[in-house]
Image (cartoon, rainbow, N blue to C red):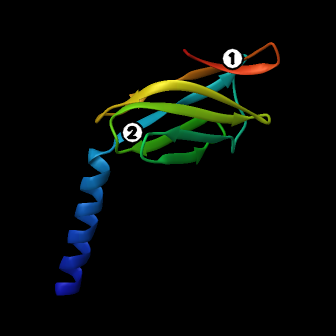
Amino acid sequence: MLRTSLLFLTLFLLCSALGLAGEIFGTLREGGKAIAKDVKVEIVTPKKTYATVTDAYGSYRLYVPEKGKCTLNVLYKTQTASFELYSYEKSTRYDMSLELKDGKYLMKRK
C-alpha cells in the first residue's frame, strides 16, 4: 500500500514538472517538403542544450523549462542552420523552412 502510494506520488510530481515546462514544437521543411527523419534538432538556452531528432514527417518536439530567448539549431546536410526564438510557459509552435542560399542553409519561420 505504501509502495503504491509512493509510486503514484512520484508519477504525479513528474507529470506536474512536465506540465510547467514550455514545449517547443513544429515542422521543418525544405522546398515545401518535410525534411528527412532523424535530423538533429537542438534548443540552446543560457543554462542547457536540449536535443531531439525529427520524425518521418519532419516534426520535432522539445520541453524547455527555461523561459526567454534561445536558439534553434538544425544539423542538416553537414551544416548547422540557426534561428533565434523564445521559450514560454505554454506550448509554442515554430514551423520552419530551410532554404539554401549561396551554399549555406538558412532557416525562416513559416
Above or below, comparing residue 11 to residue 59 in the picture:
below
What residue does disc 1 label? 32
Q: Position of residue 61 (x, y in %)?
A: 49, 40
Query: Where the N terminus falls, by quadrant?
Result: bottom left
Is residue 84 rendered to the left or right of residue 18? Answer: right
x and y, in percent, of residue 40 in the image: 65, 43
Residue sitting nearer the eye, 1 or 83: 83
Q: Residue at x 51, y 39 (%)?
A: 43
x, y percentage for residue 6?
21, 78
State the mark number for residue 105: none
Residue occupying the point 73% across, 36% down: 36
Badge 2: few (under 14), some or many (20 or more) residues near its Cα, within 10 Å? some
Name the residue beneath numbered marker 2.
23
Q: Secondary structure at mark 1?
A: loop
Disc 1 vs disc 2: which is toward the camera? 2
Decide: few, some or many residues near mark 1? Use Cα within 10 Å; few <14, some 14-19, many ≥20. Answer: few
Q: Is residue 94 visible?
A: no
Q: Position of residue 21 (x, y in %)?
A: 32, 45
Q: In the displayed structure, would residue 4 be above or below residue 109?
A: below
Proximity of marks 1 and 2: CB atoms separated by less than 8 Å: no
Quadrant in which residue 70 is drawn: top left
Badge 2 marks a residue whose secondary structure is strand
Query: Which residue is at 73% across, 22% downward?
Result: 105
Q: Residue at x 29, y 61 (%)?
A: 14
What is the three-letter code of the residue carrying label 2?
Glu
Question: Is 4 situated left or right of 68 in this image?
Answer: left
